[in-house]
Image: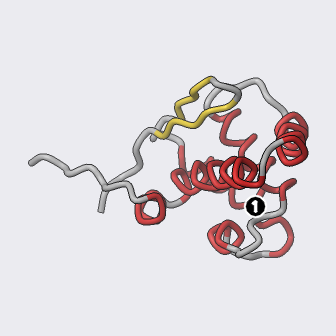
Amino acid sequence: MRGFEDVTISWRGVDYTIPAKGQMMLIAKLEDALSGESGQQAMTVLFRKEGPPYSRLAAAFGAALRHAGAKVTDEEIYLSMQADLANRSKESRTATIQNCILALLSIISPPTFGSVSGAEPAEKKP
């Protein structure tokens, strides 16, 4: 089994790196943001056919960005998502939400992210 690795996520054209060290605490925050009082597993919420509620998705993405050093609020992210939903084509809207979900999956469950995104895990050299 491999350990955690640095993850890079983007917000408004800027890349932010989430270091491998400390990701467990971030994962706990992401799970809380995604699950809320429902008690459902974060993975269940992310994989729902209709996807997670946008407010929860914004809160989780905000937690990840702040962990990486971004100065952003959940409200900013939510309003940006809503503007995208109102002003973009259906395909573009879907891609925006999917990219956010994939970014969170890459933190919460790297093995699942790789199988969903088609990414191949890096081979460890002896």
Count of numbered labels shown in the rendering: 1
Image-based side of 68 in relation to 50, left or right:
left
Q: Position of residue 98 (x, y in %)?
A: 65, 55
The foreground one among 116 and 40 is 116
Disc 1 crowd rating (10 Å Cα; few below 14, some 14-19, many 20+) is many
From the viewer's perspective, is residue 36 above or below residue 110? below
Q: Residue furthest front?
A: 89
Residue 88 at x, y = what percent? 81, 43
In screen coordinates, is 125 left or right of 114? Answer: left
Q: Return the residue nearer the eye: 1 or 73.
A: 73
Scheme by which the image is coloured: secondary structure
Q: Helix, strand, or loop for circle 1?
A: helix
Foreground residue, 34 or 82? 82
Outermost residue toward the left in this view: 126
Quadrant in which residue 115 is drawn: bottom left
Instruction: Answer whether residue 29 is visible to the viewer in this image.
Output: no
Would residue 92 appear left or right of 75 to someone viewing this image? Answer: left
Residue at image point 61% right, 33% down: 10
Residue 118, above or below 18: below
The residue at the point 82 percent across, 38 percent down is: 77
Residue 51 in the image: x percent, y percent? 74, 67
The quadrant of the picture occupied by the N terminus is bottom left
Q: Is residue 64 left or right of residue 114?
A: right
Q: Where residue 126 appears, x then y in whole percent?
A: 9, 48
- Identity, as a three-letter code, of the amino acid under mark 1: Leu
- According to the picture, the residue beneath numbered tag 1 turns out to be 34
Residue 37 in sight here: yes
Residue visible at 56% across and 57% down? 105
